[in-house]
Image (cartoon, helix red, strand yellow):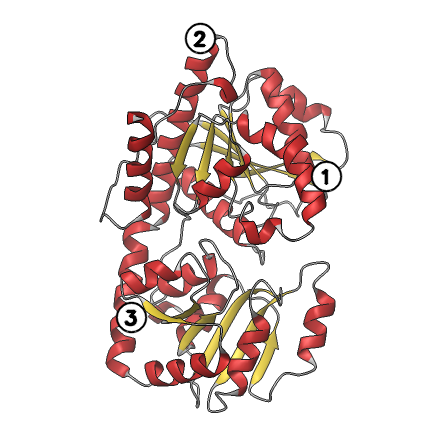
Amino acid sequence: MQLMKIAHVGIGPSQDSVNGIAVSGWGLANEQCRLGHDVSILFTGRPPPLEPQREGPLPLCIAGGDWLPLSHSFRHLLRRGRFDVVHMHSVFVPMQARLAALLWRVGIPYVVSVHGGLDPHVLRRNPIKKSLYLQFIERPRLEHAAGIALVLPEEETAVRAVARHYRGVLHWLPNPVEECRDPGSLPLEPPPERPVLVFLGRFDVHHKGLDTLVSVAARLREYDVHLYGACDHGESGKFLQLSRTLPNNVTVHAPVFGERKQQVLRRATAYIQLSRWEGCSMSILEAMACGTPCVVSDCTHFSRWIEQQDLGLVVPHDPDESAQRIRAALGDRAKLARWRERARSFVAEHWAPTISARESVAFYDQALAYTATMAHRGTYAGQAETGTTRLQHLIKEDTPQAQITRAASSRNKG
């Protein structure tokens, strides 16, 4: 394996964040470092406190803010060939559009993980502004990318709806999920006296279905429900309004990270997430990795995998029916034990950090080869021939890898 110089953009200066993009991006960068690659984290704003003996990716501040010019020192790094590939995370970030244009001019390939940001539900929020941004800024950035990474196969439809002329590399790249630590290595806590449901994430009332979750909790008075997270700017008013109507068995907490997060998940009877839409939720995957049974809404893409692989409970958005199903399922000890073991094994087999890191390097190799081919032909990514998706660890037919491979094969034959 040839070692690479990799830069990640859009995951922030710290991995302790209530943000699935930051959690997955830092997890990938850390594992790439463990494999020996030279990895940097590019960010804007105030640098984090210095940690002289810290191992892992190198944080580099490239601008004082999202709307400020990129620094001269960073431009100098680009001219000196500091990076082989730049991996951008997320969409609708003006700084990334400016960075993409600069990378294009200096000849450094970049790839993009959209992380569910082009889902139709997302585009319906502030639709006029997003429509204009997509047409004039986001579409050119995507169509000039050497590669686009998908977190789930369903994301390809959304990507192609925006980047209609894209003919580059599409690749399923699993979010890296750390294995839950041995319970014996964590501080002991007394077991809860009552069954516990836990939610971890952003307090976005509509997106995360927190209003439905609270309604379900009101029908499950024998359960304690704990919400760990923080509000996005613009969402605090809605959550504050919801918090005034919380039943007595619902408690709100600050976000938790690292070992404390694993403690919270291990003590829970089940993890619950009733989102109105969701891609590949890091919180669900982390709960599964800890062997915590998951209850998810049938509106999420990931619910199909949970049902097909018998990994947990899928419920509708109707609070009465959801409460009945939860009460029945979580009272079945044999079913809970089966879900714990199957979910833990499923995540370890398909979302382990080593798998994600090695798959990312294969993705970068394809993107670099694609860029070299296009440079030789004297064209740009938006006008190139169809790129193929190479997935090296095919598993069962109904998995993300197999779906994208079949789709790519069909496009190539056509």
Q: CA distance from mark 2 to mark 1?
A: 34 Å
Question: Which three-letter amino acid code belongs to the residue tagged 2?
Answer: His
- Of residue 270 and residue 353, the one placed in the foreground of this image is 270
Q: Amino acid at mark 1?
A: Asp
Give the CA distance from mark 2 to mark 3. Answer: 52 Å
- State which tag comes first along the sequence, 2 or 1: 1
For the point 67% across and 59% down, the residue is: 232
- The residue where tag 1 is placed is 66
Residue 7 shows in this picture = yes
How many residues crowd around disc 2 within 10 Å: few (fewer than 14), some, or many (20 or more)? few
Quadrant of the image occupied by residue 34 = top left
Indicate the amino acid at tag 3.
Trp
Q: In the rendered image of this protein, does residue 118 appear above or below residue 347?
A: above
Q: Is residue 68 above or below residue 209?
A: above
Q: Is residue 411 above or below residue 125?
A: above
> Which residue reaches farthest front?
414
Q: Secondary structure at mark 3?
A: helix
Front label number (2 vs 1)? 2
Q: Is residue 288 left or right of residue 236?
A: left
**Residue 15 visible, this orientation:** no
Q: Residue at x 33, y 81 (%)?
A: 329
Q: Position of residue 379 (x, y in %)?
A: 50, 12
Residue receiving disc 2: 376
In this view, the residue in front, 306 or 353, is 306
Horizontal and vertical percent position of residue 343? 30, 64
Q: Label 3, on which residue?
A: 339
- Give above or below for 239 relative to 159: below
Q: Give the image location of residue 223, x and y in percent.
A: 47, 87
Secondary structure at badge 1 equals loop
First in sequence: mark 2 or mark 3? Answer: 3
The circle drawn on residue 185 is: none
